[in-house]
Image: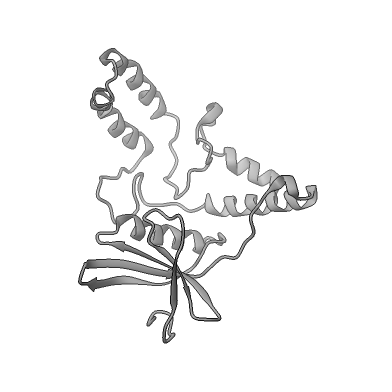
């Protein structure tokens, strides 16, 4: 309430969300979305950071108004309050061709903006419980070191390890660019031998 400068709000639990602790906050005239997660709340803190980066790039995402940490009798919780981005369900079969094309064009613009946002390393945003890597091949090499253990945990055949390792060795050579907040091609960066990771970028340029 202090973050919103209102005397009180009504909280309604929203379905979905990564931790099922997302609420619609209503003061009678205005609406926000509040999120809560018990510390260390790594996923929520990274989501706040990612959303801020996307918003700064002009992507149509909610804007975080405030966030912080509060002590309760049940422990400390991280919270955030954000604006609501209004929209309607998109059902292509019920819309005219012109409206579908308009929606696709707008999506292309949003994706182009999102795919310009770089980050400082391959791996998680801050806060980071795991190591990050300065290059894609270093990230792939770390994954490759864990292949034998992963195959064993999955109950796979040990003789499969060399062939899987060969795939990772090839994968490590397929991208030499900077790390991005969103994969350049949300359907798979290197599908179809697209070594530069520009597949979605090219499609967006056609749409826009």
Q: Position of residue 85 (x, y in %)?
A: 56, 65
Horizontally, residue 188 falls left or right of residue 21, namely: right
Seen at 53% across and 61% down, the residue is 61
Q: Position of residue 26 (x, y in %)?
A: 49, 76
| Along the viewing direction, whichever of 37 and 48 lies nearer the viewer | 37
Residue under the image location 27 percent in, 52 percent down: 128
Position above or below: 182 against 4: above
Q: Can residue 101 be seen by looking at this rendering?
A: no
Q: Residue furthest top?
A: 159
Q: Nearer the viewer, residue 71 or 50?
A: 71
Where is residue 21 shown, x and y percent of the image? 37, 61
Looking at the figure, which quarter contains the N terminus? bottom left
- Any part of residue 111 in sight: yes
Picture colour scheme = one colour
* Quadrant housing residue 78: bottom left
Q: Residue furthest bottom?
A: 7
How far across and down, in percent of the image, does residue 71 sit?
Answer: 23, 72
Quarter-of-image position of residue 44:
bottom left
Taking the spot 68% from the left edge, 49% from the top edge, the residue there is: 91
Q: Residue at x 50, y 32 (%)?
A: 190
Quadrant of residue 89 within the rendered picture: bottom right
């Amino acid at each position: 309430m202090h973050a919103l400068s209102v005397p009180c709000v009504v909280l309604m639990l929203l379905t979905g969300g990564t931790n099922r602790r997302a609420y619609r906050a209503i003061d009678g005239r205005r609406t926000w979305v509040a999120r809560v997660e018990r510390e260390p709340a790594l996923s929520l803190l990274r989501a706040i950071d990612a959303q801020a980066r996307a918003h700064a790039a002009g992507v149509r995402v909610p804007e975080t108004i405030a966030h912080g940490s509060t002590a309760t009798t049940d422990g400390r919780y991280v919270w955030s309050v954000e604006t609501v981005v209004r929209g309607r369900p998109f059902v292509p079969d019920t819309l005219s061709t012109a409206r579908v094309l308009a929606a696709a064009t707008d999506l292309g613009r949003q994706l182009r903006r999102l795919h310009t946002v770089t980050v400082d390393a391959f791996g998680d945003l801050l806060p980071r419980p795991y190591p990050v890597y300065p290059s894609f091949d270093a990230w792939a090499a770390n994954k490759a070191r864990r292949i034998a253990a992963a195959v064993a945990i999955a109950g796979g055949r040990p003789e499969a390890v060399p062939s899987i390792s060969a795939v990772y060795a090839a994968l490590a050579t397929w991208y030499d660019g900077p790390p991005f907040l969103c994969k350049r091609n949300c359907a798979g960066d290197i599908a179809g031998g697209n070594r530069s990771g520009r597949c979605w970028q090219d499609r967006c340029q056609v749409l826009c």
